[in-house]
Image (cartoon, rainbow, N blue to C red):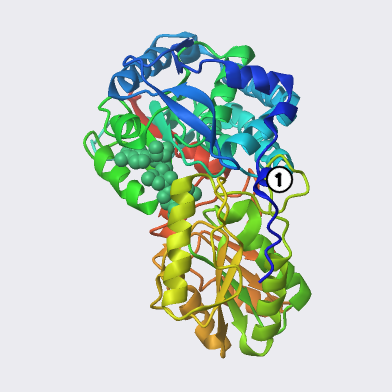
Amino acid sequence: MNTAVSTPSSLANDLSQIQPANKAFLARRHGLLIDGTWVPAASGKTFEVRDPSSDEVITHCAEGDAVDADRAVAAARRALEEGDWSRMKPVDRERLMHRLADLIEQHADELAELEAIDNGKSVVMARYVDIKHAIDVWRYMAGWPTKLEGKTLPISGNLVPGQEYAAFSTREPVGVVAAIIAWNFPLLLATWKCAPALAAGCTVVLKPAEETPLTAIRLGELVQEAGFPKGVFNIVTGAGPSAGAALSSHPDVDKVTFTGSTEVGRLIVQAASGNMKKVTVELGGKSPVIVLDDADIDAAIAGAAGAIFFNQGQVCCAGSRLLVAKRHFERVVEGVSAAARGMKIGPGLDPTAQMGPLVSSVQRDRVSRYLSEGLAAGARAPAGGTAMKTPGYYVTPTVFTDVNSQMSIVREEIFGPVLVAQPFDDLADIAKLANDSIYGLGASIWTSDVGKVFRLASKLKAGSVWVNCHTVLDPCMPFGGYKQSGWGRELGGEAVHSYLESKSLCINITG
Ligand code: NAI
Ligand code: MG
């Protein structure tokens, strides 16, 4: 097992090299954004933000709780019903969103660096995936406000004899939206929620993950610079069980949109039932990568490695189960294992590093527990299998074989760079094996036979099916889960419509 472990010092970010703007940002006291003003938490409490590559504290943020959630929701309600936002023309909402996209673009390198320090991810990936995609999504969603049309409804109107009616449907913002997000793609997930919500005319209270609040705060500053009216976009940083729970159960929040674990997703759904909030939840996954016997095997090996190791495996649709036609199994497993063994491990700010630390010590310990469970249950690890003994939260990229469907490493979402590989014999069985999961977020099929693509894709219970690629996302493509991977869809027109209510307007036009 060769995991290219360097000395701990080369595994820590060198923060003396970061951009002056980010040095100044880390030195600031970070408040909550409520009604257009940065304020401390009502309790005065703060929490530490750590660099995952070194476990060092890099800054502090205000620790908002239920009192702050109340203040933020009240500001969002006022902005929705009384402020300039409520009177703003769709084209002006569009202009503000484009201005914000331009500002994010201007500050893209700075935001990517901040993401790398806060989350641990590669600065290169952050720039070309997280930040680029966020800009694309803001621009795509900026096109929607002017296109939210209702319909003229062709009613027969013969319920009351002698009366005539005309009927229309209109689309209105659902109201105050609470967006509670995870730490794996901080700016991108904030964008997935807030861009369609604002396009629809809603107002927002964003609660970033406590592990990664920094780019959300920077986004709040850019929202202000873009000129959004006060109270339209509020941020409450703080812990899930206090600030998050207060928002998801708040009687004056109309919709809650969440990305995170299925366990917390269930709590969100229960909390939302109090006032029957609308709910979108994007949850866990255990997505299969299916390599058929006619696949381009080299492409499949590279694709499978990317599907699991991208972002340290902390991807909701990560290809964490590799299912390979039996005759290619050894070759594919060896290819992916060689890729894992050859990865350069290093901190996010090292542009040549291919595998960074996990987001937190909690996540490192959770993933390590799965590694031990897998080995104890009899799985074999041709690559990796261990956490690293460094202050940063590193684990070695791991491939498991000799697994069975009872093992926790096969059944549960690990959310780390850990792949389980299983052979299959018969094409007829493959959909059953692929669907043998409580989750249904993504799946990829690797093949050169278009007929098999259509036959298999329709049988897969997954919100996204990729062919000869994996985790390809675009602002126009709805993304979300079957089964316990969630309710509703992000991105595309479907996302925008999930932030709208439909109203039927019926007029008696009897002469
Ligand atoms: P989590 O689901 O606890 O955290 C996500 C967000 O929910 C954070 O903002 C957190 O503050 C908030 N939250 C936590 N408890 C809450 C509550 N009671 N009410 C309202 N909000 C609450 O995720 P965590 O603990 O960071 O990760 C645990 C596991 O969840 C991971 O190992 C992974 O398997 C899965 N996960 C899946 C994600 C996905 O993209 N599908 C993202 C993050 C985690
Ligand atoms: Mg949690």
Viewed as shown, does residue 473 lie left or right of 360? right
Q: Measured from the top left, where is residue 60 in percent x and y? A: 49, 23
Q: Judging from the image, what secondary structure is the residue with disc 1 in?
A: helix
Between residues 91 and 112, which one lies in front from this camera angle?
A: 112
Q: Is residue 137 visible?
A: no
Question: Could you say where residue 135 lies in the image, as x and y percent from the top left?
Answer: 68, 33
Q: Nearer the viewer, residue 212 or 260?
A: 212
| Quadrant assignment for ligand 2 | top left
Mark 1 Cα shell of 10 Å, populated few (<14), some (14-19), many (≥20): some
Residue 190 visible within the image: yes
Give the residue at mark 1: 10
Q: In which quadrant is the C terminus drawn?
A: top left
297 to the left or right of 28 = right
Q: Quadrant of residue 113?
A: top right
Badge 1 amino acid: Ser
Q: In which quadrant of the rendered view does residue 138 lie?
A: top right
- What residue is shown at x 73% (from left), y 50% (from top)? 353
